[in-house]
């Protein structure tokens, strides 16, 4: 709420539908799916679909080039007056697929200077790009952090690709963990607001998320968003195939209640698509597919 918030922070969140519970009634976000490549494997992900760190699993978004993304953002900005935020949330990792993310942000900022830029990442490549994010005035970054203990991490991530090679097991999880913490600390040091997404996986990291909440709070995270694992055998993920279940609504709420008093919780996440357009909860955007937006001006 505005009353108990630092005015400088309020300025940054008052029209961001994910970072402010109040704002989500009035302001809209849109995603452009420009970043298909990813540098890690999560057991809840099937690469045929959108990044499940930020999105509902099992959804396929229309991939765009930065030029196509710009056209789409201009079209939507003209038709959706509540639009305040442009987010890049996959369909892979926006920091790993950096060239396309950066080109998109730069082109959009040139045409629509007052739109807020937002990015979601698994964090592995994040430390390499914090300086550029700050230069581009990106004020909102989401990192998906599912563990702070590599032993837990090894049950969630079979491998990562880092520094030109593949790592597996506990070593992979330890590197990912160190890069996530470093990225978070670097963002906090620059005053960039961070939201931590955690996927709640019963029996794997559900109890552990209490420790995750403490670690990210200590490192300045602005919000912690605990999302339920959505596991469906039809999605062909590792967890889907092994029968790992997601939490039910009561289990999710019970964990969120236990986290009260730690890092502030986000409870209004709608697990958007990587090409979502509109107010949260409206998945919309299908009216803005490429074939329906105006072509390049020649
Ligand atoms: Fe998009 Fe994510 Fe930015 Fe929001 S979504 S990149 S922070 S603008 Fe929002 Fe959607 Fe939940 Fe994400 S409701 S999935 S938290
Ligand atoms: Fe899939 Fe996202 Fe995990 Fe990459 S970071 S494996 S796209 S869920």
Image (cartoon, rainbow, N blue to C red):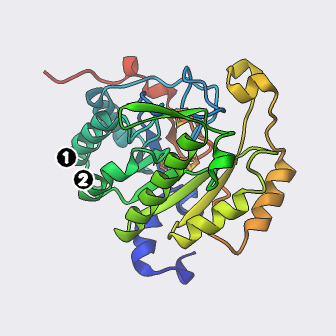
In the drawing, does residue 159 fall left or right of residue 73?
A: right
Res 113 label: 2
Above or below: residue 43 compared with residue 146: above
Q: Secondary structure at mark 2?
A: loop
Q: Is mark 1 within 8 Å of ligand 1?
A: no
Q: Are marks 1 and 2 in contact (CB under 8 Å)?
A: yes
The quadrant of the picture occupied by the N terminus is bottom right
Q: Nearer the viewer, residue 152 or 5?
A: 152
Q: How many marks?
A: 2
Q: Is residue 115 visible?
A: no
In the drawing, does residue 210 fall left or right of residue 113?
A: right
Residue 81 is situated, as x and y percent measured from the top left of the image, at: 41, 48
Residue 131 is situated, as x and y percent measured from the top left of the image, at: 27, 57
Q: Which residue is mark 1?
A: 110
Residue drawn at x 79%, y 39% is 246
Q: Is residue 101 visible?
A: yes
Above or below: residue 245 compared with residue 218: above
Residue drawn at x 55%, y 42% is 171
Q: Nearer the viewer, residue 43 or 280?
A: 43
Q: CA distance from mark 1 to mark 2?
A: 6 Å
In the drawing, does residue 25 fall left or right of residue 87?
A: right
Residue 2 is situated, as x and y percent measured from the top left of the image, at: 53, 77
């Amino acid at each position: 709420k505005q009353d108990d918030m630092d005015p400088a922070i309020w300025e940054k969140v008052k029209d961001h539908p994910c970072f402010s519970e109040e704002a989500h009634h009035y302001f809209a976000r849109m995603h452009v799916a420009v970043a298909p490549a990813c540098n890690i494997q999560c057991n809840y992900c099937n690469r045929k679909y959108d990044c499940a760190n930020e999105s509902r699993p099992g959804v396929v978004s229309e991939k765009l080039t930065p030029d196509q993304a710009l056209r789409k953002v201009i079209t939507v900005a003209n038709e959706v007056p509540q639009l305040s935020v442009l987010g890049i949330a996959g369909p892979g990792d926006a920091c790993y697929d950096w060239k396309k993310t950066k080109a998109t942000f730069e082109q959009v900022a040139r045409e629509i200077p007052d739109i807020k830029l937002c990015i979601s990442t698994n964090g592995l490549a994040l430390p390499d790009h914090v300086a550029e994010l700050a230069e581009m005035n990106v004020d909102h970054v989401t990192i998906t952090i599912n563990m702070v203990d590599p032993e837990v991490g090894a049950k969630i991530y079979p491998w990562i690709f880092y520094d030109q090679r593949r790592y597996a097991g506990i070593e992979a999880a330890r590197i990912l963990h160190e890069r996530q913490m470093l990225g978070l600390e670097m963002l906090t040091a620059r005053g960039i607001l961070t939201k931590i997404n955690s996927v709640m996986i019963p029996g794997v990291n559900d109890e552990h998320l209490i420790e995750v909440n403490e670690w990210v709070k200590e490192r300045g995270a602005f919000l912690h968003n605990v999302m339920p694992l959505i596991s469906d055998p039809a999605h062909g993920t590792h967890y889907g195939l092994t029968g790992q279940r997601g939490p039910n609504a009561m289990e999710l709420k019970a964990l969120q209640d236990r986290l009260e008093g730690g890092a502030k919780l986000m409870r209004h996440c709608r697990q958007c698509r990587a090409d979502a357009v509109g107010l949260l909860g409206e998945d919309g955007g299908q009216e803005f597919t490429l074939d329906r937006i105006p072509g390049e001006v020649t």
